[in-house]
Image (cartoon, rainbow, N blue to C red):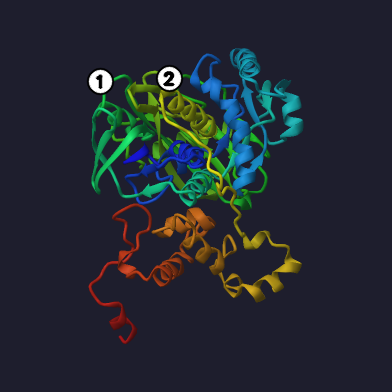
Amino acid sequence: MHDVAIIGAGVTGCALAYTLSSYEISVLLLEKENDVAMGATRANTAIIHAGFDPEPHSFMGKLNVEGNRACYALCEALDVEHRRTGSWVVAFDKEQRDALDVLHQQGIENGCKGLEIVSGDEARKREPNLSSEIIGALWAPEAGVINPWEFALAMAEVAVRNGVRFMPNTEVTGITGASDHYDIETTEGHYRARYVVNAAGVESDSIHNMVAGPAFHIVPTRGEYYLLDRSIGTLVKSIVFQSPTSAGKGITVSPTIHDNFLIGPNSEKIDDPQDTSVTRLALDEIREAARHLVPSLDTRASIRNFAGVRANSDINDFYIAFTAPGFLDLAAIKSPGLTSAPAIARLAKDMLKAEGLSLSQKAHWKGGRQVIRFKEIPEEERKAFVKNNPLYGRVICRCETITEGEIVAALKREIPPVSIDGVKRRAGTGMGRCQGGFCGPRVLEIIAREQKRDPLTIEEDARGSQVLTGTTKREDCAHA
């Protein structure tokens, strides 16, 4: 019997697991995929939102600013890559300019600091590549960019270090309530928990409906992106938003923590919440909208296109409530869900405590995290470092200068990667111009060696994405 079972290891579930790991309770984190952060957490615009966009009375409005400040604090504590860049919302006509006043007032009510509305000319002084047609802009200095999957992974790793039980490849198929607990049926067996938290993202309405009647409906909404090579130089230093609409925050031009640029997303309602396909029509629309913001943008520098599916819903807010005694929904978490995750976790902890969960602080909780990134070691110190750590002297990913030592270290962390992209999310291999074309086979070899696995079983990413096929035994290949 577990005290709390969390369904879903996206950023919301990982943030709650991290928060609860400091208490003397048993926590189970269930995830249907083979790794943490396999849904919207890894396919988004990677922004720490300032908090001016949500309406003040909503959960999003109440939690965004708290989450913003908690994100920065956690990134420092857990050595997660991030950068405070600030953001712009730009206006091209009087109607959009009037909308900036609404956003400015909302931001003040939500607790944002440093907001200001400036003229188009002033915005271009700070960002020379902005369109000459922009007549005004809202500046929000508290916005920033983050490595979103590393953020979720870091919280999950600390949680596991402190006793949280992580179960990947474990899809929930049914939930039934008893007098003092819930029985959870999964593809990997049966579990019991006194409290259940639904953090299942685009599947959160389905999990909710296992326990109670429908209260909200997830409307899966696909957003597609360009990732541009850093060779294009500094287009903009800060995040640039269109004026928002009912469909979302619109097309964004945003730097990344790796000095690339993300362009997107569009907003398309789809039937299949797992459909992350990319379409030419959508990419063309994104390109033209982005050029309206930054005319010099050139998508021929694209090194990757991808899509994520957001858990939009028919209530236009987070759905945070006890559906039944001991069953808590953290559902319909769309943007600014990544930013709000630490605040959602704090609220969920408080709600569980009020519901009767006994929370006693651990005397010896082990927090913090530090990651060795070889390219960040000062050049004058590298020779001595490699002498003591020889694996860091062999570069595997040339585009990003990622060494074998960093890959092996990732494979030895609290939640070891099981796929090539799992290593990518932890160490950064395959993130550069060739997108793993050069280093992918070498990463596969290192996984096979360190985990003593048959190379034929190693996946590119999700379950069933094996890279190699064949029937010949490995030892036979060596003598062929």
| Residue at image coords 61%, 54% | 370
Which sits in the foreground, 381 or 24? 24
Left or right for 207, reference 43 = left
Residue type beneath disc 2:
Asn
Circles 2 and 1, Cβ within 8 Å, touching? The answer is no
User: Which residue is label 1 attached to?
Assistant: 213
Q: Is 314 located above or below residue 14 in the figure?
A: above
Which sits in the foreground, 466 or 234? 466
- Label 2 packing within 10 angstroms: few (<14), some (14-19), many (20+): some
Disc number lying in front (2 or 1): 1
Residue type beneath disc 1:
Gly
- Identify the mark at residue 301; answer none if there is no mark: none
Give percent across and percent down for residue 420. Answer: 42, 60
Q: CA distance from mark 2 to mark 1?
A: 19 Å
- Secondary structure category for the residue under label 1: loop
Q: Is 50 located above or below residue 33 in the figure?
A: above
Give percent across and percent down for residue 433. Answer: 54, 57
User: Which residue is label 2 attached to?
Assistant: 316
